[in-house]
Image (cartoon, rainbow, N blue to C red):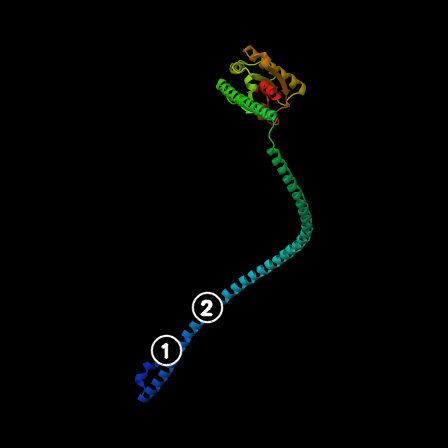
Amino acid sequence: MKQIINLSCFILTILLFSSCVSNQKFKDLEMVKNRYQSQVDSLRNNQVDEEAIEASLIRMENEVKSCEDELKSTREHYTSQVNYAEDLQVRFDELLEQNKMLLNASSDDIQILSEAKAACAVDLNRTQREAERLKSALAACESRPIPEPIIKDCTEYRNQVDRLNQMVREKDQALQSLRSKVNQALTNFSSADLSVSERNGKIYVSLSQGLLFKTGSDQIDWKGKTAIQQLAGALNSSKDIDILVEGHTDSSGSAAKNWDLSVRRATSVVKVLTSAGVDPKRVTAAGRALYVPIASNSTRAGKAQNRRTDIILIPNLDELYKLINQ
């Protein structure tokens, strides 16, 4: 670029002095000018070529860098795939070894299964023969006339079964009716104070200690007496129900004291029931102390659930047993 500027200054200088030279010199200078103009044009073209080459060089450098990055990524991927292939080879070898072991074990199992199959076939054949024998015996029995006494006994047996079923249905209906009466009699008490449930053909009326007694006492509070008296009213209408009153404690204190306390509490409940008109012959008092918990004694809430009195209503099945023993 500097050469071009110097050349341009030289040409201008020549032009300024052109009026002072002869025609021949003017032509010579014109030739010189044209020659230098050619050199200027050549230099300009060379400059354009240099810029193009520089741009091409930058582009090629970028492409080389991109290729280097791609080569690096490809090399990392290749290394990862090689490691993965090595892991697969190790797993394949392990599976191959396991397969060999299973094949060896399977041979023993096949032998055992074959022996078991043979034994089953023998048992099946024997069972089929026994079934055929029993089938023939049954056909022979069915072809014989049934003696009149046997028919009479069978008829009486069926009638007895029907009476038993009828009595069981009646007991179930009476029990459901009693449960309904108990629920109605105790509707004004909360579930925290008492609950009514049915288990194993018996009705359990579970009264909490908070409803009946103060801590360590066997004297029933007025609210507890009210609940027991209302329950007695429902029980007086069901004469074929026996009543078992069980006292329960938590695990606090000694076992001896818990035994005594649970018995005294059960007896106190029995006294209220009988004073409300329940036949004493139908009632039994029992103390269970801490030995029949319904919750864990390791928590305060569990202990509160265990301190309770259960009034268990049991259907009287004497008539049913008499019919069975006939």
For marks 2 and 1, the one nearer the N-term is: 1
Helix, strand or loop at label 2? It is helix
Pick the residue in front: 227 or 79: 227
Residue 1 in sight: no
Residue at left offset 65%, top offset 18%? 259
| Rendered position, 5 above or below 112 | below
Q: Amino acid at mark 1?
A: Ser
Q: Mark 1: few, some, or many residues within 10 Å (few <14, many ≥20)?
A: some
- According to the picture, the residue beneath numbered tag 1 turns out to be 8
**Label 2: how many residues lie within 10 Å, few (<14), some (14-19) or many (20+)?**
few
Residue 300 rendering spot, x and y as whole percentages: 59, 25
**Residue at screen point 42% across, 76% down:** 46
Say which residue appears at 45% left-offset and 70% top-offset: 56
Relative to the observer, which residue lies in front, 255 or 268? 268
Callout 1: SS = helix
Look at mark 2 in the image and give the residue it sits on. Answer: 59
Question: Mark 2 and mark 1: span between their CA atoms?
Answer: 34 Å
Query: Would you identify the image quadrant in which residue 100 lies?
Result: bottom right
Q: Nearer the viewer, mark 2 or mark 1?
A: 2
Question: Residue 50, how many percent across, how many down?
Answer: 43, 74
Quadrant of residue 81 within the rendered picture: bottom right
Identify the amino acid type marked 2. Answer: Arg
- Could you tell me which residue is drawn at 38 percent across and 81 percent down? 38
Quadrant in which the C terminus is drawn? top right
User: Would residue 221 appear left or right of 108 to someone viewing this image?
Assistant: left
Q: Residue 48's spot in the image, x, y percent?
A: 40, 74
The single residue placed furthest to the bottom in the displayed view is: 24
The N terminus lies in quadrant = bottom left
Can I make out residue 152 in this image? yes
> Where is residue 114 shown, x and y percent of the image?
67, 49
